[in-house]
């Protein structure tokens, strides 16, 4: 794609990239209340955790998106896990997300012999439709579970009494 460059994220990119991440979540309003500060912390975490798998997309020199992901050994080989792929709303529908996904997938296949990509996404129509259009399927046998740690510990403490 002309004008698109994909490269590894550097620490100096985190400010701009956190702006993009924050803007994505404000635009799509999926219930997550990201701020530039919280986005920065999350992206910094990924850059420290897996700097080799933290990429950004520049379009005509402007940072417009990113993809951070990890590798986890599994019973059938290495899996890409917990990926976060995002593209600024003004640059949606230009295949930038697709190009990021292709680039990182080819890179991880070659470097880590990855066999699958497992991730979570919101049940919002847009991301699910896009993921399904490129070959993902919903795993109906799995559910995502989550808890407020303080509430859980409180319940566990009450059960002990």
Image (spheres, grey):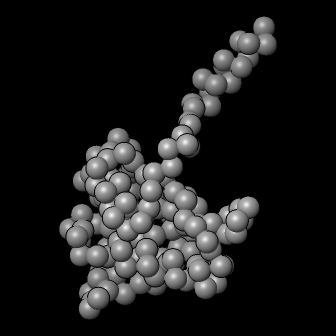
Judge whether residue 116 can be spotted in this image: yes
Image-quadrant location for residue 15? bottom left
Tell me: 89 left or right of 122. left
Q: Residue furthest bottom?
A: 2
Up/down of 48 relative to 120, above or below: below
Residue 27 spot, x, y in % from top left = 24, 53
Image-quadrant location for residue 85? bottom left
Which residue is drawn at the image coordinates 73% and 17% (left, top)? 157
Which residue is drawn at the image coordinates 22% and 70% (left, top)? 93
Tell me: 112 left or right of 131. right
* Nearer the observer, 40 or 56: 56
Residue 98 spot, x, y in % from top left = 36, 74
Up/down of 128 relative to 106, above or below: above
Residue 146 spot, x, y in % from top left = 56, 36
Q: Residue furthest top?
A: 161
Judge whether residue 45 can be spotted in this image: no
Up/down of 108 relative to 156, above or below: below
Viewport quadrant of the N terminus: bottom left
Which residue is drawn at the image coordinates 39% and 47% (left, top)? 122
* Nearer the observer, 15 or 137: 137
Viewport quadrant of the C terminus: top right
Residue 66 spot, x, y in % from top left = 41, 71
Q: How many marks?
A: 0
Image-quadrant location for residue 51? bottom right
Which residue is drawn at the image coordinates 44% and 56% (left, top)? 137
Q: Residue furthest right?
A: 160
């Amino acid at each position: 794609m002309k004008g698109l460059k994909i490269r590894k994220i550097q620490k100096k990119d985190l400010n701009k990239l956190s702006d993009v991440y924050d803007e994505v979540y404000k635009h799509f309003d999926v219930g997550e209340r990201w701020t530039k500060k919280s986005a920065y912390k999350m992206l910094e975490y990924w850059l420290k955790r897996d700097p080799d798998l933290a990429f950004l997309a520049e379009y005509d020199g402007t940072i417009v998106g990113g993809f951070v992901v990890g590798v986890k050994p599994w019973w059938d080989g290495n899996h890409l896990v917990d990926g976060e792929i995002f593209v600024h709303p003004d640059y949606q529908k230009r295949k930038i997300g697709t190009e990021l996904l292709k680039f990182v997938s080819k890179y991880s296949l070659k470097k880590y012999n990855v066999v699958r990509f497992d991730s979570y996404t919101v049940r919002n129509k847009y991301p699910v439709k896009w993921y399904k259009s490129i070959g993902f399927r919903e795993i109906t046998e799995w559910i995502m579970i989550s808890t407020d740690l303080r509430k859980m510990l409180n319940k566990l403490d009450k059960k002990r009494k």
